[in-house]
Image (cartoon, grey):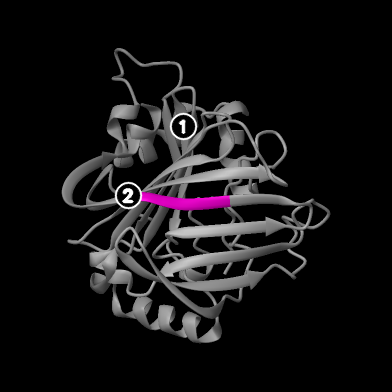
Amino acid sequence: MKKPILLALAMILSMPALHAQLLKKLTGKKKQPAETEETIDETFPQARGSAKNAQPEPTLIIGGDDAVKIDSSYEYDWAVYQESEAFQGSQRVIDGGEDIVIYYSSTQAAFSIQLKSRSTGTKYHFYGDFGKESQLMLAGVGGIASGDKTRLQLEGMEPVYPGEIGYLSQLTRTGSKKVIAGVACEEYVAHNLRQDPRVVNTNHSKVTAYVWIPMDPHAVFPGYSLMPEHFKIQIERMRIAGSYPPVVMPLEMFLEYGNGDKVFTHTTHIIVNERRKVELGDINK
């Protein structure tokens, strides 16, 4: 599984490649309205002004695979609140890390991750919809956002999340178990020994990850059972092979890098049975 994940160690840690590509759209060459009109109208009509009051540039541009259908809003009723902290050795990085909310649904096989960097204020939103077999990644800063929608494929699924477990293909159970925010979890450990092009020749080419994952995915993602059968079969095969499909996010994670940098992500609280509507345009609020 390849899943690049955000690190915000102030100016020390670099952004994952996918995030950089999304941010490039915010600062690079402007697209002409003709290139984005169909996508914007289908996915988030409010992002465009009327013909009479047209604005120079829409505040939300969504590109990607035109064959993939996404909604402009989603409803969730479970929310997992997390924080990540960044360290250089034993020294905590001031304003490093991220604030995270992971939304899950009990009525459909869908979830979302909203992440905000404390150091830059940049927001990253991810939407995974197993019913429509689609995923959407957005990046936004300063009231302008862009992103790409693609077909959801577990082996290439790349939700934003602190750390770099996306570069780790093998997670091994340690046998340790503990309860985090009322959810029974088990610990996995992994080492990044591959020559992944995203980390080769960087300070983070070697990493050890300690990851606490819910033992029962339904404990935080009730809609898990509503996934199409072929996803369930694929998830089971991936687990047997030793990989971790990014469907239910860890409730705790600690990463140690070869240069002494560290990232610690932990759950602060979980809210259940509270319905909320999440708009794609929320990234610009």
Q: Is residue 22 visible?
A: yes
At mark 2, the secondary structure is: strand
What residue is shown at x 56% (from left), y 40% (from top)? 97
Residue tagged 2? 269
In the rendered structure, which disc, 2 or 1, sits on the residue that comes first in sequence? Answer: 1
Q: Quadrant of the C terminus?
A: top left
Look at the image and say whether residue 186 sits in the magenta stretch.
no
Callout 1 amino acid: Ala
Residue tagged 1? 145
Look at discs 2 and 1 and give the one toward the viewer.
Answer: 2
Q: In the image, is 258 to the left or to the right of 242?
A: right
Question: Does residue 250 lie above or below 45 as drawn?
Answer: below
Residue 122, x across and y down, in percent: 52, 32
At mark 1, the secondary structure is: strand
Instruction: Locate residue 213: give its quadrant.
Output: bottom left
Q: Quadrant of the N terminus?
A: bottom right
Most foreground residue, 89 or 95? 89
Look at the image and say whether residue 266 sits in the magenta stretch.
yes
Question: Does residue 91 lie above or below 144 as drawn?
Answer: below
Most foreground residue, 257 or 28? 257
Segment colored magenta: 264-269
**Residue 23 image label:** none
Q: In the image, is 155 to the left or to the right of 89?
A: left
Q: Is residue 161 visible?
A: no
Most foreground residue, 62 or 20? 20
Residue 145, x across and y down, in percent: 46, 32
